[in-house]
Amino acid sequence: MTELDNINDVFTQNKFRGMVLVLDGLLGGGKTTLARLLTQTEKHINFSISATTRPKREGEVDGLNYHFMTKEEFLQKKEEGYFLETTERLGNYYGTPKQQVEDALANGEDIIFDIDYVGTRELKKQMGEDVISVFLVPPSYEVLKQRLWDRGSETEESFKVRMKQNAEYLKLWEEYDYIFINDTLQDTLRRLQQILRAERLKRHRQPWLEPFVTNFTAEFED
């Protein structure tokens, strides 16, 4: 066995700690599409499954689309520290179960979050270096406008509101670890894949390294 074989053997026989990948950015920036592409092209990466108090819609499955709860149950669990982050929209609560994420990371699974800056701040506060955040922007103002219109879901009034929100949101870009100009989906997907590979090699995501180095060091003392 060559030295390179030995190195590869060490890496393949040991488990890496997973990471939380936050994809955020401007409305119309392509984050939802890219998140879906990542789950289709990468092994061991899945969407976070949130808990919610909103009513279940036709075709939705508890534990697959959401963890459905009553408001009373949700608020009780929030008091107990059950969630990593929570938010309220249109009178309904949403939150990320903490243990679900921790179990996935310990098992070498990566979790994608499609959340806003408030949720991102809370995740970083709770999970520190487990969190990698990426902010996506289109290549130009004109492209952003076109992408929003092409979704076919905006009225003239809602379009103005979305663009005003984007103007405010862009001011937050420096809070993120990476910022990508999403010119084409394939180029941006490739950059995201490169981030995943590089981040997995960081020391704190290789929990087997400490005992490995300790045992290696002991060989010099014999």
Image (spheres, rainbow, N blue to C red):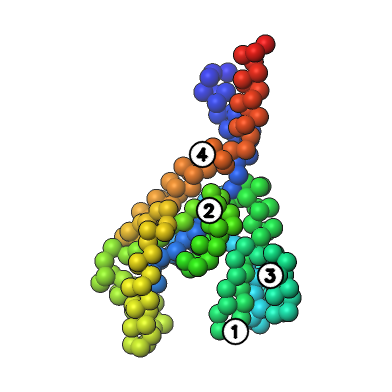
The residue where tag 2 is placed is: 131
* 37 relative to 206, above or below: below
The disc, 1 or 4, on the residue closer to the chain's N-terminal end is 1
Give the structural element (helix, strand or loop) at label 1: loop
The residue where tag 3 is placed is: 78
Which residue is painted at 48% across and 47% down in the image? 196
Quarter of the image for residue 211 reads top right
The residue where tag 1 is placed is: 91
Q: CA distance from mark 1 to mark 2?
A: 28 Å
Give the structural element (helix, strand or loop) at label 2: strand
- Foreground mark, 1 or 3? 3
Q: Is residue 25 left or right of residue 121?
A: left
Marker disc for residue 201: 4
Residue 98, image x, y percentages: 66, 60
The residue type indicated by label 2 comes to: Val
Bin the neighbour count of mark 3 within 10 Å (Cα to Cα): few under 14, some 14-19, many 20 and up: some
The disc, 1 or 3, on the residue closer to the chain's N-terminal end is 3
Asked whether the residues under the numbered discs 1 and 2 touch, taking CB atoms below 8 Å apart as contact, a structural biologist would say no
Residue 30, image x, y percentages: 40, 66
Bin the neighbour count of mark 2 within 10 Å (Cα to Cα): few under 14, some 14-19, many 20 and up: many
The disc, 1 or 2, on the residue closer to the chain's N-terminal end is 1
Quarter of the image for residue 147 reads bottom left
